[in-house]
Image (cartoon, rainbow, N blue to C red):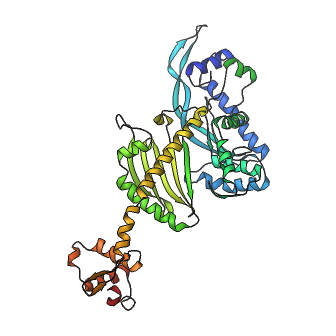
Amino acid sequence: MGMQRCGQVVYWLQKVLGITAIDKAALSKRSGQYVSWVEAMARKQKIPLEWWEKGINKEEYVRPYLQKAERAGRWGVYFIFQTMEQGWTFRPGFKKVEQEDGSQYPILHRHRSRYRYYYFYLRDPELGPMILRMGTFIPFEASYWVNGHSYIERQLERQGVKFEKRDNAFVSIEDVGKLQQAADRMTGEVIRKRLDYWTFALGPKFSKADRKAANLERSYFVHQVEYCRNFIFKKNHPIRKLFERSCELGLWRLTGDKIVEVFGRRSRQRLTGKLETALHRIEHGAHVFRVYWKWAVLKQYEKYSRLLRNELTSNNLRDFGLKKGLAHLGLAREKFLGVLDRFSEVQAENLNVHEDFALVRRIALPVERGKVRVPGIRIQDVRVMRLLEVLLHAGTVPGGWTAVKIHEAVIGEFRMPPASYDLNSLR
């Protein structure tokens, strides 16, 4: 039955616990008991329990505690943050209703208010590092952050497979087949078992009689999910060139109709949300190419100068015609991988410039005009690229350029000493 509706909460309090007067004190009693239990558990197990302050990056702050737990080989909770956040709960209203005994009590209704949340940072033997966010007021809503790369890492360690992992990316591995097999074993059922365990261990306590009488159970739904494909290179040079060119072509050729096809649709009728492409610059000067479709976004970016990543994020699985239950995670994976494959095919088509190779080769050959032999233009040379940059960005009438003016423009644009790049070098 759960406790997501007012009638369910009233039934649990009145019929199961025997509380007739459902007032603010009755609702807060359960919250106070849970807060006291968390504080006692933290003191007993010597787990840091701190209030989060605005401006603090949670992940950066708890990373030393995570590293300490990893060195000690300790599983379970290693840090707890407590915050005041907005969330759904239940409050007695102003309108009263008469009870069987003649007394009057206010009607219970859903209410959004600000109350305490706990962030449990923990290490799980199966899923690796994860986060549990637990509310302290009824209905005691629980939210989890799980990283699939951590689960795969645990599976490979158990099998003794050697690999190199940086953050959430595998940059090398001795057996690619076992890597894929580990990823395939991460199903919704595997995740649900571990979530049930930690919800029972760290959440509010209900007796067996309470759970049986009110039929209390947990249901998990996917709020946000991400899948990616990584193209790993041995050198950074081809990644940079491919990424820059794919951004240029993507902004120009990835139109609305093409975006709809990439996401597996054939019509743009009655479309809500975004439908666009954009190139964003994030911290440290890195660029991310984004494709927006409804409430989903497909990103492409470089990572660690070793791989080119295509990443699809969805905040509403209904956009893909999928249900949000954790049991449907396998269907979401198949759907997302299909989108990533189609996006890669579109990029491969855009980057297929073999028909231009003949032109590039032809303009590099010398040209003979009577007895005069004019050398070809080798556009891969640095000095030619600098010349073209000046001509394209500083000139409006190419026919009006003279050799002297071009020479002065090149030297001024790139701040080159005249002695190192004279007029004869230009010619």
Q: Nearer the viewer, residue 419 or 357?
A: 357
Does residue 403 sit above or below 128 in this rendering? below
**Image quadrant in which you'd find residue 195:** top right
Q: Residue at x 52, y 26 (%)?
A: 110
Q: Residue at x 51, y 22 (%)?
A: 93
Residue at coordinates 74% horizontally, 54% vertically from top-left?
161
Q: x and y percent of residue 201 in the render? A: 73, 36
As rendered, which of 224 and 34 lies closer to the eye?
224
Q: Position of residue 241 (x, y in %)?
A: 46, 65
Q: Residue furthest front?
A: 370
Q: Is residue 194 above or below residue 236?
A: above
Asked whether the viewer can see residue 413, the reply is yes
**Location of residue 263 in the rendering, given as x and y in whole percent from the top left corner:** 44, 42
Is 340 located above or below residue 238 in the figure? above
Location of the C terminus by quadrant is: bottom left
Number of numbered discs: 0
- 104, above or below 362, in the image: above
Horizontal relation, residue 126 to residue 350: left or right: right
- Hey, which quadrant is residue 423 in on the image? bottom left
List x then y, in percent, for residue 264. 44, 40
Depth order, front residue of 427/155: 427
Quarter the N terminus occupies: top right
Identify the residue at horizontal 67%, vertical 20% (top origin). 215
Residue 80 showing in the rendered view? no
Residue 419: quarter of image: bottom left
Between 306 and 209, which is closer to the camera in this rendering?
A: 306
